[in-house]
Image: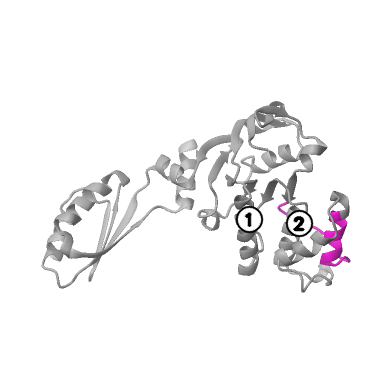
Amino acid sequence: METIELDHLTVDYRAVRALDDVGFPIEKGGITMLAGPNGAGKSTVIRVLLGLVRPARGRLVVDGKPAGVTNAWKERLGYLPEAVAFAENLSGRQVLAFFARARGVPKQRIEVVLDRIGLSEAATRKVRGYSRGMRQRLGLGIAILADPEFLILDEPTGGLDQEGLTVLWDILREWREKDRFVLLSSHDLTLMEQRVSRICLLKQGQLCALGTPEELRFMTRLPIRVKFQLDAASEEAPIFVDDVHNWGQVICLDHRDNHLSVEIEPDDLLSLMDIRNRNAAAVKRIRVEEPGLDLVYDSLLKKAG
């Protein structure tokens, strides 16, 4: 597969429109994230891709051609549900063996996956004795068991400790390096911000924003914070502070000891740097902090109405 696109999907659950003309590409070699509040339509998008829901209108397009959710399509998928559940009396190895037989996966792959998800030492333990994080890792193991082209992960960070998160990040990095497809749904914007390549923001079944994290930041035009570490020995330091204070474009200013922090509009950054360049000796270090993805998310949802 070279391209996957959802084209004008509309899904109705009786009187409720779960998706309303939603369409977006899923990037090859990248990680596309579905974001939005509960009931936004994220799970419905995933159900369409899994063939669990048939859209009233719209279609799945693969390599530029309309594609049905056939058995051949499903064989190319790996899926982690939001709530994982297993037979409690089976061991982790037995659970993977069951799914390996169902997918026609060689037995050797089971040990590879157990090592990949960090459960080799717990492979013979009954699942009933697994922690929530271990169960989530086992679910990840099932998702990657058949080495799928397209990985679909619904809330993959749920219950994971730092060890489990490392496993997840390694899997996501591997799928990117293999130039494959990943679609994930997550509420954990802070954790995902540095790892996703594109965000699809949904609200009430409609697509309200689509782009990279930086593109979404640009859409909101939220203020940025610029922090200066001043040189206390420089005669220019108090002049620089006064110039910034009198500049007139500062939203918020905080000056404590040798640290100056200002909040400004993004378009005013170059002008602020001009003030700094006129008093270059006053400043030892500069740090620019952009708004977090959680703030961007809130702003875009408010704009969507």
Question: From the viewer's perspective, is 248 left or right of 107?
Answer: left
Residues in magenta, as a range: 81-100
* Coloration mode: one colour
Percent position (x, y) of residue 28? 61, 42
Percent position (x, y) of residue 80? 72, 52
Q: Secondary structure beneath disc 1?
A: helix
Counting residues from the start of the chain, the first of labels 1 and 2 encountered is 2
Total marks in image? 2
Label 2 neighbourhood size at 10 Å, few (<14), some (14-19), many (20+)? few
- Residue bearing the label numbered 1: 174
- The label shown at residue 84 is 2
Task: Please tell me which residue lies in front, 290 or 11.
Answer: 290
- The label shown at residue 302 is none
| Residue 269 appears in the rendering | yes
Query: In the image, what residue occupies the spot 75% across and 61% down?
Result: 113
Question: From the viewer's perspective, is 84 left or right of 195?
Answer: right
Label 1 neighbourhood size at 10 Å, few (<14), some (14-19), many (20+)? few
Please report contact status of discs 1 and 2: CB closer than 8 Å, yes or no: no
Question: From the viewer's perspective, is 212 left or right of 107?
Answer: left
Query: In the image, what residue occupies the spot 19% across and 56% down?
Result: 276
Quarter of the picture containing the N terminus is: top right
> Identity of the amino acid at label 1?
Glu
Q: Secondary structure beneath disc 2?
A: loop
Locate residue 126: give its quadrant. bottom right
State yes or no: residue 191 in magenta.
Answer: no
